[in-house]
Amino acid sequence: MSTLVAHEVPGGAAWSVLLRSGRELVLTARQNAVNCSVLLFAAGDVDRLNVPDTLKAQMSACVRAPMVLMSDRGAALACVTGSSLDWHDALCGHSLDRHLERFGRSDYAEHRNEWRRSARAGLLSELRKHGRGEADLHACVNFFSKVAVADDDRGSLHFVAGHAAADDWVSLRAEQDLLVVLSTAPHPMDPDCAPGPVSAQIRPADPVAPDDPSMLFRAESARAIEAARAVFA
């Protein structure tokens, strides 16, 4: 299938793109242990990704194919059409500046393009390019990362190191026109600070068939896709 746009996002950087309905964004890890924190907004509308409702409606503690990523109003923003991984973290949110303090001081004057930035800093930088700001930050999906329940009395969460390897991938089909904002800064619970690059490719998606896996996954998933179609009826 032809690629319309190809972009390499360096480790620790941020990027944003307008993704038309019916197109597919494929994210591919370019090295081991990458993380990609992703925000989704309906282009030109008030809808944005609602991670709690997405998980609750589809009875899951993680994001995986063929789940639907739902908006505040229960409409599908995108469908996870495929992935080499069966788990993408949606519980822990994006990293903050204070999460990087344990790795020592870093700034552009000293480290130039290698300076360490949190996902929050990168996401805000991209949001401002689209006239958005802090109020638009919402719970993200950390693609390529996994956080599981630890074997302790508290049932605490722990970061699963080595979950993703180079060439792992995930594909998202836009169900309506979207603004996608992403950061390749490390996951907030990652004990290492070695951000890796991610490649992004946009291509036409296959037409949605009646037996589309996202339509058949759960009744709630199908209703979300139908709600997205009603937006443009």
Image: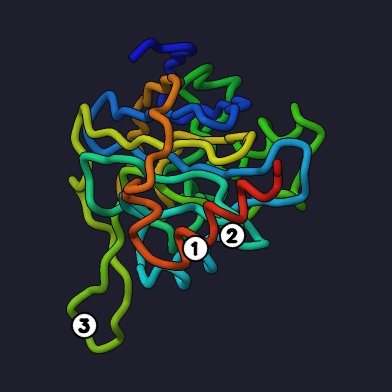
The quarter in which the N terminus is drawn is: top left
Q: Which residue is mark 1?
A: 54
Mark 1: give few (<14), some (14-19) or many (20+) Cα within 10 Å. Answer: many
Image height of 149 relative to 94, above or below: below
Q: Which residue is mark 3?
A: 152
Label 1 close to label 3 by CB (< 8 Å)? no
Q: CA distance from mark 2 to mark 1?
A: 6 Å
- Residue beneath the point at 59% across and 43% down: 40
In the depicted view, which residue is nearer to us: 9 or 118? 9
Indicate the position of residue 118 as horizontal and vertical percent values. Answer: 53, 41
Left or right, residue 35 beside residue 148: right
Image height of 207 relative to 67, above or below: above
Q: CA distance from mark 1 to mark 3?
A: 28 Å
Q: Earlier in the sequence, mark 1 or mark 3?
A: 1
Indicate the position of residue 48 as horizontal and vertical percent values. Answer: 66, 51
Q: Earlier in the sequence, mark 2 or mark 3?
A: 2
